[in-house]
Image (cartoon, rainbow, N blue to C red):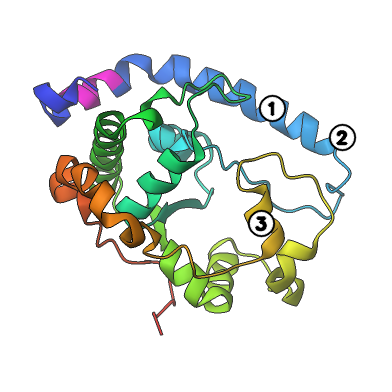
Amino acid sequence: YAYKTAGLSALVAYTKSVADTVMEGMNERWESNLLKADQGAEVTTATKRLVDKQNINFHFVPYIHLIFPNALILHMVREPMDVLFSAYRLDLNNRDTEGNNHDVTSSFEGLANSYGKYRDVMNYWDEALPGRVMHVRYEDLVNDFEAVAKAVIKAADLDWDPSIIDFHKKERAINTPSANQVRQGLYTRSVQRWKKYEEFLNPLKILLGNNAIYDQETNLPGYKRK
């Protein structure tokens, strides 16, 4: 994150310097993903879209744009304090199956620093590739699920299927920390959950500074917040 001190020009230069290497690596990863998907029980000849929801993908927006120009790039936006409280509460101080180190979640300083870098990166992609990333607010998703889901499906150029509403009833393996939540379906009790512990989380909010607020709205075509 040299651009934190050197400016956005440093990020542009870095992006260009590693472009070939990153694109080659992403091509290999996607070819591997497609091979695995072809062997999966849920993938059939009727499968029209594959989803890559790795949380590090926000680093690779321009490469996704170049390799898959027709890909729908979705960015889930949520109340910053809720995001960081969730990460802190889950104790992700280990490496996941992809080898990513989550040590930053074990301290308020690490959380604030990591989150600030993420916001800088996303802001830059919006400047460099205006309109390429579709932002979806978590709060809109849980409060107005059907409307948001229909907007996502339309943006992906797919046909609406009513069974999407009952996604939590599907019998399939879920190997993520959110497995229990997925099985429960959508609920709104996690919105502003951090407020219950505001006295203890206030130091984190102070460290975030202006990043404690994220007013990005859902910008899916055709969606209007109810």
Given the image, on which type of amino acid does mark 2 rest? Gln
- The answer to whether residue 205 is above or below residue 164 is above
Which quarter of the rendered picture does the C terminus lie within?
bottom left
Q: CA distance from mark 2 to mark 1?
A: 13 Å
> Disc 1 marks which amino acid?
Glu
Q: Disc 3 designates what residue?
A: 182
Q: Is residue 39 left or right of residue 62?
A: right
Q: Which residue is mark 1?
A: 31
Question: Which element is circle 2 on?
Answer: loop
Query: Depth check: 36 or 193 in front?
Result: 193
Q: Position of residue 18 (x, y in %)?
A: 37, 16
Rendered residue at 54%/48% (across/down)? 71
Residue stretch rendered in magenta on the structure = 10-14
Across and down, in percent, residue 120 comes to 23, 39
Kindly identify the residue that appears in the image at 51 percent across and 22 percent down.
Answer: 100
Can residue 100 be seen from the camera position used here? Answer: yes
Q: Are marks 2 and 1 in contact (CB under 8 Å)?
A: no
- The residue at the point 40 percent across, 61 percent down is 193
Q: Which mark is residue 72?
A: none
Q: CA gap, disc 3 to disc 1? A: 28 Å
First-in-chain label (3 vs 1): 1
Residue 24 pos. (x, y %): 53, 18
* Quadrant where the N terminus is found in the figure: top left
Q: Residues within 10 Å of mark 3 (few under 14, many from 20)?
A: some
Residue farthest toward the bottom in the current orientation of the protein = 226
- SS for callout 3: helix
Whole-angstrom CA distance, mark 3 to mark 2, is 24 Å
Circle 2 residue: 39
Q: Is residue 133 magenta?
A: no
Q: Residues within 10 Å of mark 2 (few under 14, many from 20)?
A: few
Q: Does label 2 or label 1 sit earlier along the sequence? A: 1
